[in-house]
């Protein structure tokens, strides 16, 4: 689910509020800034733990009933489960246990896999990182390129076509696009032969490890899910870059550059782009939330064995400890990336860096 | 808007009606806005009229009229689904839950978001700081995992999807309404009302709310678009009402009942295209209204 308004949402702008200040006390300033941002991130994380506890521990009326549904259970077993889950303790005490456990990396036991949630998450982390990383890089490259060119000449053909495409792709459900690509390129229709595998991350039975054949196999499996995510996400980067380019358009330094006799492409690449990049780069960090939402549905469609698919599997039971674990991991990673965005902005702004 | 106009010139058209006329003229001058409106009217009429020509037996999985997953024919214009029901029928019926959930979720979102935005904008100070910190924190949370968690905990069904959407989509509205409240409260008529002894409650409900209402409308049209996407996503993941037919559940069934390996494009394409058209319709209207009300807000 993307944000409902234009891609340049309020969240994105709040990252830019930090006033750049230069001077002799730059290092101390930075330490102060860093401390404040880290403290804010810690508060966010604490609130996240409260929310996670409320949703997954307080709202479910009877976890024991959910856990034993369909199994014949004796009163003794139920009493044992209540004790094991700590349901007979006061709420505050349960919350305290939950916080301590989470901080130590104990996220509970998955009901369906009967494995620690933390272990499952670690197993599934790498495929998600691979998918999200590769599609982020590709969509940044495409989105930036289009954004720079369409923002430089707003209203021209390229701008109209690419902005229209962006709005259309925004309206397309990610999972549906994934299924379409699956039918087109994996099942094959008419003259199109089945080009790519339908799901999973590697062909069963092939040798693992770092063998070139295995890496090639993973790459073949990666193509379709990566393409789906790129198609849905590149528009966000394009809109961000486009609007920061437009912000630069009226500036007098561009007139100076033109007056020096520079060609249009040089004015754009050497003068406008570096300035437009500054706000964009930090906004790019903040797209992680959108990427996560996309990854959940895309991984489901392609059975890509990552955290998103794990969430979907947890949903089928529903396996509450596992859902809680993935929710906390996803949200915590967004908090971390928000912090990185704040730091990147501070670092990239030359007025601050020089001091 | 301005009480002075009404007292000095009682015979002229009220300013709000004038503004409305100007708005309608501006709206009619935008082809994309009219296209969006046409889509909306058509879909709403279809959704409301569906029970007139679709009967429960058409939607029943047992004793469905056709063969499972058969391609388009003269009898079934878009073929049949996994149970042998007509895709056209399902498509029309699917309009109902998708629209209903999106509209109700949006209404909840607007109530929650406007209340928080108005309170934060009107009272300022620590109230504003706490409410806006909460809003910013909520905006930063990834929406889908949160919505999935909520809907899973509340159990399969329409109401849990509705609640999950409302809980995850209010922060944008809250921010917008707070900003507009601040802008309205800076205007002289608020000072006049305060000088006349208006209390907080009266100021917010009688003076500020009518003036930020147009922005609530903008936010609502864009929120409906997002809510439809969210609703179909959650339904696709299997969180919807299992006995009802919606666009999201159609795609879910197509995907998990073998339409992909059968290459059944007629089963997969229509619900997705329907979603895109409706979302696009709401987005076009939302953007047009946004542009008319505040040309600087949307570029």
Image: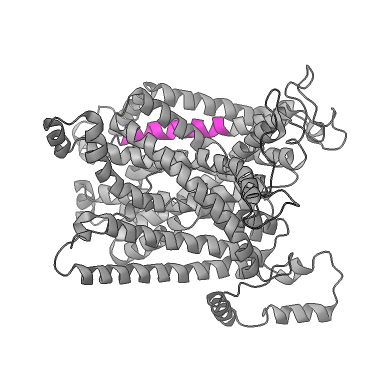
* Residue at 48% from the left image edge and 27% from the top image edge: B36
Q: Is B91 displayed left or right of B219 in the figure?
A: right
> In the figure, B6 relative to A29: above or below?
above
Q: Single out the residue that lies furthest toward the front.
A: A212
Let me know if residue B217 appears in the view: no
* Residue at 33% from the left image edge and 32% from the top image edge: A149
Q: Position of residue A240 (x, y in %)?
A: 36, 42
Main SS category, magenta section: helix
Magenta region includes residue A328: no
Q: Which of B267 and A268 is in front in this view?
A: A268
Q: Nearer the viewer, residue B79 or B21?
A: B79
User: Which part of the image, by quadrant, shows the N terminus of chain B?
Assistant: top left
Q: Is B97 displayed left or right of A227 in the figure?
A: right
Q: Position of residue A144 (x, y in %)?
A: 38, 40
> In the figure, A265 relative to B161: above or below?
above
The range drawn in magenta is B276-295
* Residue at 53% from the left image edge and 52% from the top image edge: A292
Q: Is B222 displayed left or right of B237 in the figure?
A: left
Q: Is B287 displayed left or right of A108 in the figure?
A: left
User: Which part of the image, by quadrant, shows the C terminus of chain B?
Assistant: top left
* Residue at 51% from the left image edge and 48% from the top image edge: A134
């Amino acid at each position: 689910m993307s944000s409902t308004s234009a891609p340049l949402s309020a969240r994105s702008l709040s990252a830019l509020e930090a006033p750049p200040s230069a001077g002799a006390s730059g290092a101390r300033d930075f330490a102060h800034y860093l401390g404040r941002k880290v403290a804010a991130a810690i508060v966010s994380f604490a609130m996240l733990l409260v929310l996670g506890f409320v949703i997954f521990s307080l709202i479910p009326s009877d976890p024991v009933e959910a856990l034993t549904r369909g199994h014949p259970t004796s009163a003794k077993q139920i009493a044992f489960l209540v004790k094991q889950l700590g349901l007979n303790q006061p709420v505050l005490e349960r919350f305290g246990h939950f916080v301590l456990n989470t901080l130590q990396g104990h996220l509970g036991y998955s009901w369906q896999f009967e494995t620690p949630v933390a272990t499952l998450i670690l197993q599934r982390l790498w495929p998600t990182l691979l998918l999200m990383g590769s599609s982020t890089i590709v969509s940044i490259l495409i989105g930036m390129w289009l954004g720079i060119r369409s923002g430089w000449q707003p209203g021209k053909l390229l701008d109209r076509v690419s902005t229209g495409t962006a709005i259309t792709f925004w309206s397309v459900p990610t999972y549906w696009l994934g299924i379409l690509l699956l039918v087109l390129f994996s099942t094959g229709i008419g003259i199109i032969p089945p080009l790519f595998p339908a799901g999973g991350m590697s062909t069963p039975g092939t040798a693992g490890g770092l063998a070139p054949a295995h890496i090639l196999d993973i790459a073949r499996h990666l193509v379709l899910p990566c393409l789906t995510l790129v198609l849905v996400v590149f528009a966000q980067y394009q809109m961000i870059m486009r609007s920061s380019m437009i912000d630069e358009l009226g500036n007098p330094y561009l007139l100076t550059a033109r007056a020096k006799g520079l060609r249009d492409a040089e004015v754009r690449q050497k003068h406008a782009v570096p300035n437009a990049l500054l706000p964009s780069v930090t906004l790019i960090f903040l797209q992680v939330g959108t990427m996560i939402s996309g990854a959940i549905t895309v991984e489901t469609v392609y059975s890509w064995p990552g955290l998103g698919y794990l969430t979907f599997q947890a949903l089928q039971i529903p396996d509450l400890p596992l859902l809680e674990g993935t929710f906390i991991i996803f949200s915590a990673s967004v908090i971390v990336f928000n912090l990185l965005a704040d730091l990147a902005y501070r670092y990239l702004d030359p007025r601050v860096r020089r001091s | 808007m301005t009480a002075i106009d009404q007292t000095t010139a009682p015979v002229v058209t009220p300013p709000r009606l004038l503004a409305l006329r100007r708005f309608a003229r501006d709206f009619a001058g935008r082809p994309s806005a009219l296209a969006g409106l046409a889509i909306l009217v058509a879909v709403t009429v279809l959704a409301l009229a569906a029970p007139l020509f679709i009967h429960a037996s058409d939607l029943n999985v047992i004793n469905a009229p056709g063969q499972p997953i058969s391609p388009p024919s003269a009898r079934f214009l878009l073929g049949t689904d996994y149970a042998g029901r007509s895709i056209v029928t399902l498509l029309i019926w699917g309009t109902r839950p998708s629209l209903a959930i999106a509209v109700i979720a949006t209404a909840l979102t607007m109530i929650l978001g406007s209340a928080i935005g108005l309170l934060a904008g009107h009272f300022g100070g620590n109230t504003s700081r706490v409410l806006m910190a909460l809003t910013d924190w909520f905006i930063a949370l990834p929406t889908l995992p949160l919505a999935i968690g909520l809907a899973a905990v509340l159990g399969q069904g329409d109401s849990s999807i509705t609640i999950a959407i409302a809980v995850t989509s209010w922060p944008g509205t809250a921010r917008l309404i707070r900003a507009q409240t601040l802008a309205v409260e800076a205007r002289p008529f608020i000072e006049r009302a305060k000088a006349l002894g208006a209390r907080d409650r009266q100021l917010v409900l009688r003076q500020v709310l009518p003036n930020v209402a147009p922005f609530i409308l903008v936010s609502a049209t864009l929120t409906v678009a997002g809510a439809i996407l969210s609703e179909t996503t959650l339904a696709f993941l299997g969180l919807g009402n299992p006995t009802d037919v919606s666009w999201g559940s159609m795609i879910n069934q197509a995907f998990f009942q073998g339409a992909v390996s059968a290459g059944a494009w007629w089963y997969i394409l229509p619900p997705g295209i329907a979603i895109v058209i409706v979302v696009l319709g709401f987005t076009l209207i939302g953007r047009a209204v946004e542009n008319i009300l505040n040309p600087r807000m949307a570029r």
